[in-house]
Image (cartoon, grey):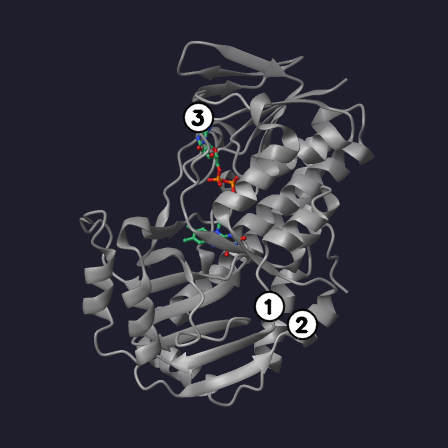
């Protein structure tokens, strides 16, 4: 039996664990945190990610946790003018699966429970990883170690495994903006209950998406210099000041939020790279392709990695080296492309060039939905379960 050691119990690591266990691997997961406390309110799991969760045997649970998004709108954040509003059903029909915004903690718990929460080894911070002739091994901060036929480093954006695989450290790139996010009860004054509503203006963005339980996942993007000091609990005052002159729906949202439960995240990404594998050690998820969240594909891409890893081992059952190289070949171009698309989208949304952003706002007023939905479909297609036509 092939033994896989997986570092990180995020959505990438747990998905990979389920995918490999499905083909009979002996899988161990090691996670640095002592308890399951995911940061971040929710994520949009686009149809490619949902197909991966379905593939992992989580179809019914995913649909239960997911919010129903039937339409999309863009609203001028300053005046309240509806720039465009359209149905998302043509997208769902085209790609064959509904997308689901899901509360992050619930998504994480669903994946962990499917694997077995008690089987995850918490409080294990990897400090070093090494390839070897017959096995790969890891060392943990508590002095213990583990080894397996393969080690999958799904250790997130600040990956230790990445430095080992690349043989150098990488610089993360600040994308120029900060994202405040959280969950709030659905309020039609902010947006319709089954709509993804986005307010735009001044290079800022305010968005709500439905998740299960009559809640909106909300986020505010605001361009800011890197490294500003943030006092936890002060998000409401900060947002009220930044959006004081914005339309009523945005002010109603700020009024409703619980400042103690708002996350503030500085957004970074990493230039795509093509080496994800060193012998028996491979990168997966943000460790391999850290992206800005602007097209909502980072987590979906991590789940695609997990499924692609399974397929690579099915194609090369007795050869870990060949399987990992096949995994790398299947994933680097697709994942890198999504990182660069997100970066481009981020620059337009956040007014890196104000004239380009103004042209986008003007275009939104002429939008009937078809070009936006085509763009989303292009992001969705190209993964292991969404082959490009
Ligand atoms: C604001 C924001 C919004 C986002 N929105 C979306 C969205 O809408 N849709 C989408 O698909 N994606 C979204 N993403 C991206 C998504 O969150 C990530 O791509 C996803 O979490 C990556 O999963 P992962 O398992 O690779 O990494 P992580 O989720 O970061 O998990 C890594 C795990 O490894 C553990 N770990 C790290 N180092 C070590 C170590 N040395 N030893 C042991 N364990 C370790 C960590 O504690 C963590 O549990 C968003 C990201 C942000 C920041």
What residue is drawn where x is 58% and y is 34%? Answer: 112
Element on which disc 3 rests: loop
The residue that disc 2 covers is 91
Residue density around tag 3, few if under 14, some if 14–19, many if 20 or more, within 10 Å? some
Give the number of the disc on residue 376. Answer: 1
Earlier residue among tags 3 and 2: 3
Tags 1 and 3 in contact by the CB under 8 Å rule?
Answer: no
Q: 304 or 234: nearer the eye? A: 234
Give the number of the disc on residue 126. Answer: none
Earlier residue among tags 1 and 3: 3
Quarter containing the C terminus: bottom right
Residue 49, visible in the rendered structure = no
Q: Cβ of disc 1 within 8 Å of ligand 1?
A: no
What residue is drawn where x is 52% and y is 57%? Answer: 213
What residue is drawn where x is 44% and y is 40%? Answer: 38
Q: 228 or 161: nearer the eye? A: 228
Where residue 347 sits in the image (x, y, percent)?
39, 66
Tags 1 and 2 in contact by the CB under 8 Å rule?
Answer: yes
Q: 134 or 379: nearer the eye? A: 379
Cα distance in 3D space between marks 1 and 2: 8 Å
Q: Is residue 158 left or right of residue 22?
A: left
Where residue 134 sits in the image (x, y, percent)?
67, 12
Cα distance in 3D space between marks 1 and 3: 34 Å
């Amino acid at each position: 039996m092939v033994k896989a050691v997986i570092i990180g119990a995020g959505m990438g690591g747990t998905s990979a664990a389920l995918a490999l266990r499905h083909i009979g691997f002996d899988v161990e997961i090691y996670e640095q945190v002592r308890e399951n406390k995911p940061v971040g309110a929710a994520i949009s799991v686009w149809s490619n990610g949902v197909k991966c969760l379905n593939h992992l045997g989580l179809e019914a649970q995913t649909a239960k946790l997911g919010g129903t998004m039937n339409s999309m709108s863009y609203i001028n954040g300053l005046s309240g003018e509806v720039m465009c509003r359209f149905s998302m059903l043509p997208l769902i029909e085209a790609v064959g699966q509904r997308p689901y915004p899901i509360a992050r903690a619930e998504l994480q718990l669903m994946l962990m429970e499917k694997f077995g929460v008690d089987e995850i080894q918490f409080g294990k911070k990897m400090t070093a990883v090494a390839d070897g002739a017959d096995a790969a091994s890891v060392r943990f901060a508590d002095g213990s170690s583990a080894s397996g036929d393969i080690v999958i480093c799904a250790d997130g954006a600040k990956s230790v495994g990445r430095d080992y695989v690349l043989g150098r450290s990488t610089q993360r790139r600040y994308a120029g903006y900060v994202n405040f996010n959280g969950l709030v009860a659905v309020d039609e004054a902010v947006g319709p209950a089954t709509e993804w509503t986005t307010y735009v203006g001044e290079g800022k963005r305010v968005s709500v998406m439905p998740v299960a339980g009559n809640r909106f996942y909300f986020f505010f993007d605001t361009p800011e210099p890197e490294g500003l000091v943030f006092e936890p609990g002060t998000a409401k005052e900060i947002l009220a000041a930044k959006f004081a002159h914005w339309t009523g729906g945005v002010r109603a949202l700020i009024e409703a939020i619980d400042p103690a439960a708002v996350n503030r995240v500085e957004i970074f990404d990493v230039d795509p790279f093509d080496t994800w594998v060193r012998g028996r050690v491979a990168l997966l998820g943000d460790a391999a392709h850290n992206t800005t969240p602007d097209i909502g594909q980072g987590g979906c891409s991590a789940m695609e990695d997990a499924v692609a890893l399974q397929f690579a081992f099915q194609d090369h059952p007795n050869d870990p080296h060949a399987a990992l190289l096949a995994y790398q070949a299947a994933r680097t171009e697709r994942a890198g492309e999504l990182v660069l698309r997100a970066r481009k989208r981020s620059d337009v949304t956040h007014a890196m060039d104000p004239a380009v952003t103004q042209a986008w706002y003007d275009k939104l007023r002429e939008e009937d939905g078809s070009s936006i939905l085509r763009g989303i479909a292009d992001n969705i297609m190209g993964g292991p379960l969404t082959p490009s036509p």
